[in-house]
Image (tube, grey):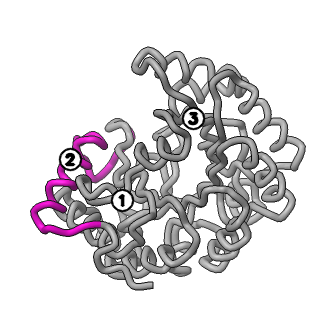
């Protein structure tokens, strides 16, 4: 942990692993989710509007190589020397026949400058075969599986139409551990039916598991989603943080988690044209600057209250 920053951040963590600056390049490989195609439901997660976070170059559904080319062109002029991770971001990127997955991952790894994969997925869409294959890839490149845990409370997962439960998350993390694969977990703060204390207890529970990376963000109500419709009818069920409130929550999260867990992200800022509420008008780096100042003011740090 960097005591100057008072928490373990992603740039330091990943450059320490790979020896250079690293940039993620998002990919939409055309997959879907089991709560969209009828296997476990329809409509997807109640909070999800994929266009609100998917880069424009991914929306044309061009080939993986073409998406990587455009993404790399966008970033390479900013830094003279950096490596790239192919970030399979949209929907569930282990939810397809094995051969289709294998071809997608290998196409990405063949692209010049790509040094590894980050695979965003659900904890109920991995099995031994795909994890064995990712373990094989991890012997020669960086591999991270990013699980959308979202909440450690089953009632909340039901309400947001997630289609998996907490046990699925625990099982997926256990199956992935010990394979040379980084494990990331994603959590949303403020989901309906979950108090802040329940969120903190859930983060503590994740922290004792073999998780390497934590991604969290405040709940945003996004236009054209089932959640936006529900929020209009039941606004009292939603915990929409002010910026100052969420800074305090982020401090509480850091204090309760293991000091060696990398915290990759604290906030989500969808384009304003997609957001119903809350509208903070702050960039990620501005938030982390404020967070570091808040940690200094309180003389606290990541892991301060962590109990194994």
Secondary structure of residue under mark 1 = loop
Which of the two discs, 3 and 1, sits closer to the camera? Answer: 1
Give residue 126's position: percent from left, percent from top: 76, 61
| As drawn, 61 above or below 93 | above
Q: Which residue is mark 3?
A: 26
- Between 79 and 67, which is closer to the camera in this rendering? 79
Q: Residues within 10 Å of mark 1 (few under 14, many from 20)?
A: some
The span picked out in magenta is 274-301
Point out which mark residue 1 bears. 1
| As drawn, 252 above or below 73 | below
The residue drawn where x is 83% and y is 64% is 128
Q: Residues within 10 Å of mark 3 (few under 14, many from 20)?
A: many
- The alpha-carbon separation of the residues under discs 1 and 2 comes to 17 Å
Secondary structure of residue under mark 2 = helix
Quarter of the image for residue 263 reads bottom left
The residue drawn where x is 55% and y is 40% is 18
Give residue 212's position: percent from left, percent from top: 53, 61
- Between 272 and 147, which is closer to the camera in this rendering? 147
The residue drawn where x is 63% and y is 24% is 113
Which of the two discs, 3 and 2, sits closer to the camera? Answer: 2
In this view, the residue farthest toward the right is: 99
Q: Which residue is mark 2?
A: 289
- Residue 222 within the magenta-colored segment of the rendering: no
In this view, the residue farthest toward the bottom is: 307
């Amino acid at each position: 942990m960097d005591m100057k920053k008072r928490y373990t951040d992603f740039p330091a963590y990943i450059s320490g692993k790979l020896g250079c600056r690293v940039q993620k390049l998002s990919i939409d490989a055309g997959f879907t989710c089991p709560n969209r195609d009828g296997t476990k439901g329809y409509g997807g997660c109640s909070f999800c509007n994929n266009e609100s976070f998917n880069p424009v170059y991914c929306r044309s559904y061009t080939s993986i190589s073409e998406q990587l080319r455009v993404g790399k062109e966008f970033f390479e002029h900013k830094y003279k020397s950096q490596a790239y991770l192919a970030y399979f971001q949209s929907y569930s990127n282990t939810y397809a026949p094995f051969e289709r997955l294998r071809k997608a991952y290998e196409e990405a790894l063949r692209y010049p400058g790509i040094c590894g994969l980050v695979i965003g997925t659900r904890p109920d869409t991995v099995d031994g075969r795909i994890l064995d294959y990712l373990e094989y890839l991890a012997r020669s490149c960086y591999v991270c599986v990013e699980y959308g845990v979202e909440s450690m409370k089953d009632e909340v997962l039901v309400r947001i139409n997630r289609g998996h439960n907490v046990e699925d998350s625990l099982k997926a993390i256990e199956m992935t551990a010990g394979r040379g694969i980084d494990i990331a977990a994603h959590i949303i703060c403020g989901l309906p039916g979950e108090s802040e204390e329940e969120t903190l207890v859930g983060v503590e529970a994740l922290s004792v598991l073999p998780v390497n990376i934590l991604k969290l963000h405040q709940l945003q109500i996004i236009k054209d989603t089932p959640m936006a419709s529900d929020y209009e009818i039941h606004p009292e069920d939603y915990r929409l943080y002010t910026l100052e409130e969420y800074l305090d929550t982020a401090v509480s999260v850091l204090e309760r988690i293991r000091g060696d867990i990398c915290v990759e992200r604290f906030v989500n800022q969808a384009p304003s044209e997609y957001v119903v509420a809350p509208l903070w008008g702050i960039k990620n780096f501005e938030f982390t600057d404020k967070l570091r100042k808040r940690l200094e003011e309180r003389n606290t740090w990541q892991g301060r209250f962590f109990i194994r």
